[in-house]
Image (cartoon, rainbow, N blue to C red):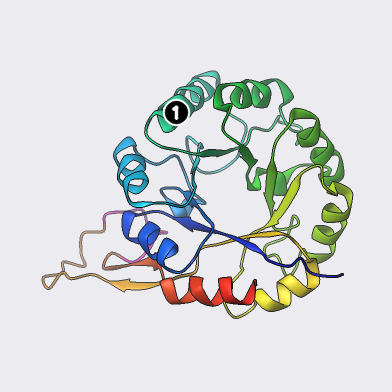
Amino acid sequence: MPKPSKAQIEICIDSVESAVAAQQGGAHRVELCQNLFEGGTTPSCGLIMAVAKELQIPLFVIIRPRGADFCYSEAEFGVMCADIVIAREFGAQGIVTGVLKPNGTIDRKRMKELIDIARPLPVTFHRAFDVTRDPAQALETLIELGVERVLTSGQERTVLEGSETLVSLIRQAGDRIIVMPGGGITDRNFARIRSLTGAREYHLSASGPVESSMKHRNSRVPMGRDLRPPEFGWSRTDAGKVSQVVRLGK
């Protein structure tokens, strides 16, 4: 499959520092989340505002009230509606969200309501797509709803594993919607993934480890549950990795 002349690179971030690094590395857009350990949830107002002040590239904000599945209660859906309004007010230039029914299909009614609230901002349907019952049917639903793009790993753990499905979805989409591969993309495998899929846009974190500056460390008192990230280290976007992917995408 021939590759496009230039790939658009979206970097998933969860901090002001990562936003700055993504921009310095040449990213074309960022998706702002919190709780990446749970796949990303809605960021705070303060974080949206602080990141918006630092960026000259588009800022997309995820609207996801919690981790786990994408079938929400009435209360959770109400929070999502309110969060879209807030995200717009604090500088979001795009919304990333998704709602499913218990049977694994896209919740048309609720998605339409979220899209209407988000307008005129563009809307990305996130990786809730990867747990839909029928990806081809789900893609047509999103096209009918007017969603601008869908983020997907091809319904597999990583984009490489889902590459055949991704190619099929990209062909099905044509110019009607952007299919954006995301999931396990790194600066090391990006060239291969681009060659396999021929996608126009790609989503990755391009992150590296950050060591805590804490000298005194009490390892007896964890701040999270038993299955948890390290207490004295975290990940942050690496401008060099972003730059490498952007260069490979030209």
Query: Residue 174 appears at what percent x and percent y?
Result: 85, 49
| Residue 225 painted magenta | yes
Q: Nearer the viewer, residue 129 or 249?
A: 249
| Magenta portion: prevailing SS class | loop
Q: Secondary structure at mark 1?
A: helix
Q: Which residue is mark 1?
A: 83
Relative to 68, say whether 108 is above or below. above
The residue at 64%/59% (across/down) is 182
Q: In which quadrant is the N terminus drawn?
A: bottom right
Quadrant of the rendering where the C terminus is positioned: bottom right
- Quadrant in the picture for residue 155: bottom right
Provide the residue span drawn in magenta: 223-230
- The residue lying at 70 percent from left, 58 percent from top is 153
Taking the image as shown, residue 71 lies to the left or right of residue 90, namely: right
Under mark 1, the amino acid is Asp
Please say if 166 is above or below 102: below
| Outermost residue, left side | 216
